[in-house]
Image (cartoon, rainbow, N blue to C red):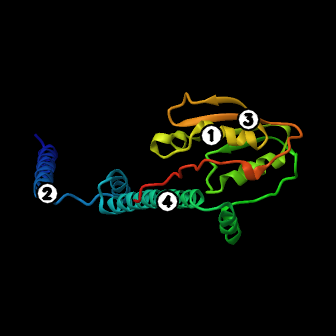
Amino acid sequence: MTEEERRGIINQQQRSRKRKRGKRHRRKQQVAGDSPPPSLEQTLNANTKNRSSPAAAVVKCNSKARIFSSSFLDKMKAKLSGGHFRMINEKLYTCTGQEAFNYFKEDPALFNMTPLDSSSVDVAVFCLSLMGTNYSSFILEAHRVLKPRGWLLIAEVKSRFDPSTGGADPNKFSKAICQLGFTALSKDFSNKMFILLYFKKKEDEKLNVNEIRWPGLKPCLYKRR
């Protein structure tokens, strides 16, 4: 074996030992937790995937708080709106038409009142709206604006026409309307909560309004909350 061949073998053995020492050193670093820091790209990817990071938790918490706050405010607004509606309803059930007129005149946003010409409409509907203590004047006004043979339709809460609980006698109620100048055509008591009454205006009827005896209608009162 020549001298050059001997040197080549020695160099190869030295390189092999260096590679082995390098592998052992890297293993020790990994065991000791002394691995090289991740790259910027690896760090960004890890932060994007880590949904439980403090920043993500704060954003998620704030989002939930905003949703809860908005939902809570909407519920409170709905309750206030419902309370306002009940307050107006109860006031209209327990006051005269003139008092109701003054009430709406003081706050026009509550109601938009438009006067109608005499004998100008074909149908007049009172749907849960005979609220005033002088409700007869409402029906008298309906008679004024209706054309001859025009329809008068009334839908009301059934309990207001139950004499056993303080309500009006429906027969006396219909009789009073007929004395005003209407013909009773139909009564519908089939619904559990409401009654429907159908009348038609007579032609050229001379009225004696002062002789009509109107039964009182029981107001609808709400429970205090």
Image height of 128 relative to 60, above or below: above
Tally of numbered tags: 4
The residue beneath circle 1 is 172
Q: CA distance from mark 4 to mark 3?
A: 34 Å
The residue beneath circle 4 is 83
Q: Is residue 110 left or right of residue 117?
A: left
Q: Which mark is residue 199?
A: 3
Q: CA distance from mark 4 to mark 1?
A: 34 Å
In the image, what residue type sits under mark 4?
A: Gly
Q: CA distance from mark 1 to mark 2?
A: 103 Å
Q: Of callouts 2 and 3, which one flags the residue occurring earlier in the amino acid sequence? A: 2
The secondary element bearing badge 2 is classed as helix
Q: CA distance from mark 3 to mark 1?
A: 14 Å
Q: CA distance from mark 2 to mark 3?
A: 99 Å
Q: Of callouts 4 and 2, which one flags the residue occurring earlier in the amino acid sequence? A: 2
Determine the image quadrant of residue 56. Answer: bottom left
Q: Nearer the viewer, residue 86 or 166?
A: 166
Query: Residue at 10% across / 58% down in the picture?
Result: 32
Q: Residue 63: image x %, image y %?
A: 41, 59
Quarter of the C terminus within the rendering: bottom left
Image height of 48 relative to 164, above or below: below
Q: Rate crowding at label 1 as few (under 14), some (14 to 19) or many (20 or more) other CA atoms within 10 Å.
A: few
Q: Residue 79: image x %, image y %?
A: 47, 58
In the image, what residue type sits under mark 3?
A: Phe
Query: Residue at 10% across / 49% down in the picture?
Result: 17
